[in-house]
Amino acid sequence: MGHDRVGGMVKGAFPVYSARKDQDDRQMAQDDRPQLYLITPPAFELADFAPRLSEVLDGAEIACLRLALATRDEDRLARAADACREIAHARDVPLVIETHLALVERLGLDGVHLTDGARNVRAARKALGADAIVGAFARASRHEGVNAGEAGADYVAFGPVGQTALGTGETAPRELFEWWSEMIEVPIVADGALDAALVESLAPVTDFLALGEEIWREDDALAALRAITAPLG
């Protein structure tokens, strides 16, 4: 399952920067900039979304795509996964699905993004094998993030990083990313409520920037992505 090398992924694992613990002076050189991780909207009509997704993937270098539909309708998930997989794989971008571990192999996807911290990482790794991507969202909990990494997660996402009225309102502070980038080798993702100022602030201390509703709510998603990531150069 998956590809030997797809986007930012090598054999199912996200890249780990060399000499990670010695990167206090990490510069935003071309090879050291965070990669972009794209998240689908929680609801969309395939006929409208497919061309928008294609345009974004053609116009920006994306390391990974996450299917994050809120529906629990298996048929709708399968149809969306089929369409997104075809678009993403044609451009060598891996596709992971949020939460639904049992659908990964059935739908020919590259892995799963778990939203409950470290709780199901070991089970996901056992079920999907070493080549699959297993990501974990740890909100703003250093403890959950470390546990997820130790359990075998390929990456740990923290967020939201920007202010939002959704959820508890708690945000993942820059200090968490600073600590992680100095101490932990598992790649880290800044996920949720990003804007250009946050991109500029977090770029030196994160491996991936996850963008979703920030761009899809705009008429021109690619232009919105370019505006938010403009500080990367």
Image: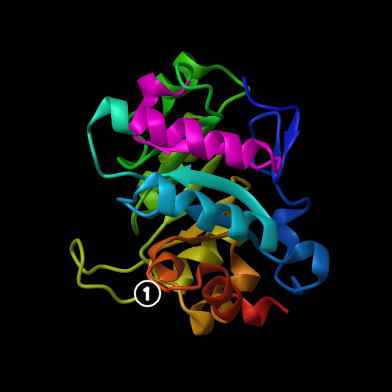
**Farthest residue toward the right?**
30
For residue 119, above or below residue 44: above
Q: Is residue 170 left or right of residue 134?
A: left
- Which quadrant is home to the C terminus? bottom right
**Tag 1 residue:** 162
Q: Quadrant of residue 21?
A: bottom right
Answer few, some or many: residues within 10 Å of disc 1's Cα (few below 14, many 20 plus, some between 14 and 19): some
At a point 52% along the width and 58% down the height, the residue shown is: 52
Q: In the rendering, at what x and y percent does residue 117 appear?
A: 34, 41
The verdict on residue 97 being magenta is: yes
Q: Residue at x 63, y 55 (%)?
A: 57
Relative to 62, does residue 84 appear above or below in the rendering? Answer: above
| Residue sitting at x 68%, y 38% | 90
> What x and y, as percent, mark residue 202?
55, 73
Say which quadrant the N terminus sits in. Answer: top right
| Residue 29 appears left or right of 101 | right
Please report the bounds of the magenta region as a residue range: 77-104
Which residue is drawn at the image coordinates 31% and 33% (left, top)? Answer: 76
Tell me which corner region of the image, top left, top right, bottom left or bottom right, holds residue 74.
top left
Q: Residue furthest front?
A: 47
Residue 112 appears in the figure? no
Amino acid identity at mark 1: Gly
Residue 193, x across and y down, in percent: 38, 70
Q: On the image, which quarter does residue 162 sit in?
A: bottom left
